[in-house]
Amino acid sequence: MRIAPGSADAVAVEDAAGAERRPSWKRPRTIGLALVALVLIGVVGLAAAQASGLVSIVPADLLQTTGQSSAPASGDDGRGAGDESKQEALRAEEDASGEAETEETGLDALPDDEPPVADGADSPSGGSADGSDSGASAPAAAPAPEPDPAPAPAPEPAPAPAPATITVSVYVDSSRAASYGYSSCLASASVTVPQGATVYDALAATGVSVGGSSSYVSSIGGLAEFSCGANSGWLYYVNGYSPGYGPGSYALSGGESITWVYTLDLGADV
């Protein structure tokens, strides 16, 4: 629709007149100022609630600005400056109360690493009233010396091997002297002698009495040379053979048959 010239000015004048006739609380400017005031009051109330510790009601990040949300105010745990100041104040109060208690009890003069001295103690180092040093640890007992190991028993000596022995037979024939009153046999035995024994040792082992020496036997069983004539005496034979040297020089090997014969004619009658 078309508006006649001058009619726009008339409308503006009418709107201005109508606005002046409205109440002041219905005017747009007044309403806008009221809204801004309400917003400011709400923000101040929320800030006061957070400062007083009502973090469960008002989240801490509600009041953070864009710059504050990008970097924590202080501390790795994201706590606000108000919380830190409160904690510092609490720590200061605790330190002050601890110092006051220390001054009252008089324990601040003691070293940090020593316990308080009990009533009646003789020294601040922990000695008790009876003179015993209860603070110092008792010296470790020296380990008992280990007993010396019992000496090993000496090994029993091995029994000496029994000497080898041999067995021979000995016969003493005195039958040719029987006519002179002597026994026809003075000894007949099988004897055991050490290996290497001689004919003389075998004769002595029979137990018959022997006169003379190992190189020459002069009597056997009391029958001596020349007892039955000038050519009488003793001869010996080994396995029927006469060695021709003294009986002490003939070594036996075992199993031999030895015969002693009394002769009346230098062996011609044997």
Image: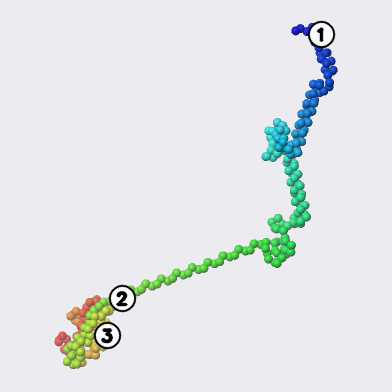
Circle 3 packing at 10 Å, graded few (<14), some (14-19), many (20+), is: few
Residue at 75 percent across and 34 percent down: it is: 46
Q: According to the image, label 2 marks what residue?
A: 163
For residue 173, above or below residue 66:
below
Element carrying mark 2: loop
Element carrying mark 1: loop
Element carrying mark 3: loop
Q: According to the image, label 1 marks what residue?
A: 6
Residue type at tag 2: Pro
For residue 10, above or below residue 78:
above
Residue type at tag 1: Gly
Task: Left or right? Give the position of 23 relative to 117.
Answer: right
Q: Nearer the viewer, mark 1 or mark 3?
A: 1
Q: According to the image, label 3 marks what residue?
A: 207
Q: Earlier in the sequence, mark 1 or mark 3?
A: 1
Circle 1 packing at 10 Å, graded few (<14), some (14-19), many (20+), is: few
Q: Nearer the viewer, mark 2 or mark 3?
A: 3
